[in-house]
Amino acid sequence: MRSSTFIIFIKTLFLVSAITAAAYLLFLKLYVYAGLLFVFTVVLAFRWASTERRLLHHVLDFSEAVRYRDFTRRFAVKHPARAEGKLFKAFNDINTVYKQISVDKEIQHQYLNKVINMLDSGIIFYRADTGKVEWINDAFKQLFQTPHLGNIKGLEKRHPDLYIKTVQMPVGTRQIEAANSAKGKIKLLMHCVEFESQEGIFRVVVFQNINEAIDHAETVAWQKLLRVLTHEIMNSIAPISSLADTLHGRLAGAYTADDIEDMKVGIYTIKRRSEGLLQFAKSYRLINKVDQPNFVDQQLKDLFENVYQLFEPTLIQKNIELDIILKDTRLVLRADTNLVEQTIINLLLNAIDAVKEVSDPYVSITGMFREGHIVIKVQDNGEGMSQEVQEQIFTPFFTTKKTGSGVGLTLCKQIMLLHNGTVSVDGEEGKGSCFTLQFPA
């Protein structure tokens, strides 16, 4: 840069000196010499100006090529030492760098395009202000039978309901909606994000078909439920049928006083097993009849205190140590007090039963705030449970107890669903169990 400035300074100084010398010769009345020097100065100035104008033209051409992202042009460097040669070399270097950047960007774009087109979820990327669609993936095209979409408003003609749900969807939220597609009426999990760049505000909406996942989950749930129902009913029906057949045989022939006594016992057994089946049906009704929650603000310390007072005599009698861990005594839970108390009571009853064979029985209740949720944990050092049991533990009527109904934990799960919360279990055989209740704060 300094060299170029110095050369321009020398050229300017030379032209000024030449013009001054021509003027001096003219003053001395040496007209021929003055004229020749003036013509030489003009020709030299013209050549230098032509060179500068040519360089300026090359710069403008290069800037125009950059504007239209054309980096294919090469400039012939004939005289590397001259200003033109140095400028052309700089242009070629810039072209090489940008060409490589363009190639890398295109590779990344193709890679990203391939990856996103491999997804089963439909994705649409459009401008939030104008609605211009920048990009849609193959899954979107197939799912909604839309091979091309120039503007988001074009979706209104094919799928008016989906268009309204898409444009009105709050940013950063997830919601499940029903929509018509190439596969018929399906359930969609929709997710919308928005970001801003120098070019404007853009939206990305993802449409995930969850029909198959829901159908699979429902099928598995029904299989589990039917397996338990079949087991419970068959356990009662089989002996009742066998016993009724035996009594029918006794009634067909002559019978003694002992036979009458046996028939009384048999009829009583049938009655008892029938009552068991009736109780089983009542338990099934109980699962499906959880009241809608009455939400109120409840301090966790008060909730834990109420539960402790209820269990204190049992804990003392069975010599079980109960720890209540609550670092922040100001934590407030918005929930139905009765339903949440019932949930904690069910978990504590299970914990007390789990530690009955342990030499130093221990149970703890912990309350905390974690990642935007109120979390309650009920932990014990009891017999624990296997991974297989953990997977089945919330299935209706599934139980590992000899006298259990398999309803308690199912009710806990129903109650947590009503609170938009979750219940989970973690444990290991011989190392105790931990049930976690998670409520939205």
Image (tube, grey):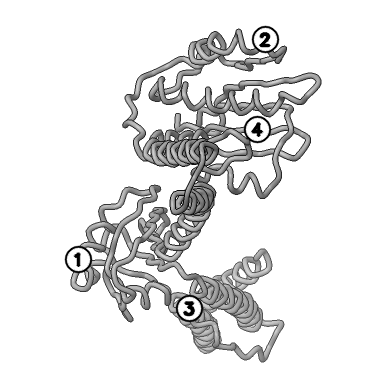
In the depicted structure, whether residue 127 falls above or below residue 356: below
Q: Please, what secondary structure does the residue beneath circle 2 have?
A: helix
| Lower sequence index among marks 3 and 1 | 3
Please give the label number shown on residue 317: 2
Pointer 3 local density, CA inside 10 Å: few below 14, some 14–19, many at least 20: few
**Residue 85 at x, y = what percent?**
65, 83
| Lower sequence index among marks 4 and 2 | 2
Nearest-to-viewer mark from 4 and 1: 4
* Residue 368, quarter of picture: top right
| Lower sequence index among marks 1 and 2 | 1
* Image quarter (top left, top right, bottom left or bottom right) of the N terminus: bottom right
**Residue 137 at x, y = what percent?**
42, 73
| Lower sequence index among marks 4 and 3 | 3
Nearest-to-viewer mark from 4 and 2: 2
Q: Amino acid at mark 3?
A: Arg
Please give the label number shown on residue 160: 1
| Lower sequence index among marks 4 and 1 | 1
> Does the CB distance between marks 3 and 1 fall below 8 Å?
no
**Residue 136 at x, y = what percent?**
39, 72
Say which residue label 4 marks.
Answer: 434
Q: CA distance from mark 1 to mark 2?
A: 66 Å
Q: CA distance from mark 4 to mark 1?
A: 48 Å
Say which residue label 3 marks.
Answer: 69
